[in-house]
Amino acid sequence: MSANTVLLVEDNPDNRDIYGTFLRHHGFTVVEAADGAEGVRLARVCLPGVVLMDVGLPVLDGLEATRLIKADPATADIPVVALTAHAMESDRRAALDAGCDGYLAKPAELSRVLEVVRSLMPVAAGGV
């Protein structure tokens, strides 16, 4: 796993810019994907420390992308956090059932995103 790397899977360019810039400012390397299929591909290539996964994505939705990441032995241990505007309790449960290790409803406070990423990042990145 690439400690200190966050894979941000988000189809909205403004959200990618906001979250990506914020995480980079706090010392993380951020790799971005605009759809779920690209997110799965990049998870396999980059082996990030944490994936921030939107749910409502084109090509492959975030829940199915999470299932694929968790089903692949090469990526199964990567923590995936749903970062989504789907904010009902049933949406949270669906994300956790799909294999997400955490859930943040958008608009998520940047400090909360940072806290969750830091809490799930592999130990090697603990100084970030």
Image (cartoon, grey):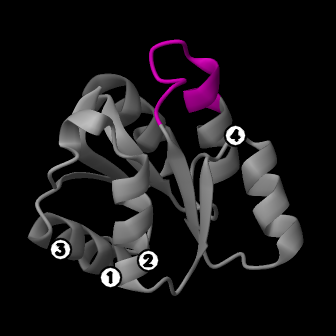
Pointer 4 residue: 99
Residue at 46% in and 33% down = 78
- Secondary structure of the residue carrying tag 2 is helix
Answer whether labels 3 and 1 touch (C-beta < 8 Å).
no
Query: In the figure, 87 relative to 54: above or below?
Result: below
User: Which span of residues is magenta-colored?
Assistant: 68-78
22 and 31: which one is in front?
Answer: 22
Between marks 1 and 2 in the image, the one whose residue lies nearer the viewer: 2
Amino acid identity at mark 2: Arg
Pointer 1 residue: 14
- x, y (%) of residue 125? 20, 42
Between marks 2 and 4 in the image, the one whose residue lies nearer the viewer: 2
Marks 4/3: CA–CA distance: 26 Å
Amino acid identity at mark 1: Asp
Between marks 3 and 1 in the image, the one whose residue lies nearer the viewer: 3
Dominant secondary structure of the residues highlighted in magenta in the image: loop
Marks 2/3: CA–CA distance: 15 Å
Marks 1/2: CA–CA distance: 18 Å
Mark closer to the chain start, 1 or 4: 1
Pointer 3 residue: 21
Q: Which mark is residue 112?
A: 2
Quarter of the image where one finds residue 57:
bottom right
Answer whether labels 1 and 4 touch (C-beta < 8 Å).
no
Look at the image and tell me whether residue 52 can be seen.
yes
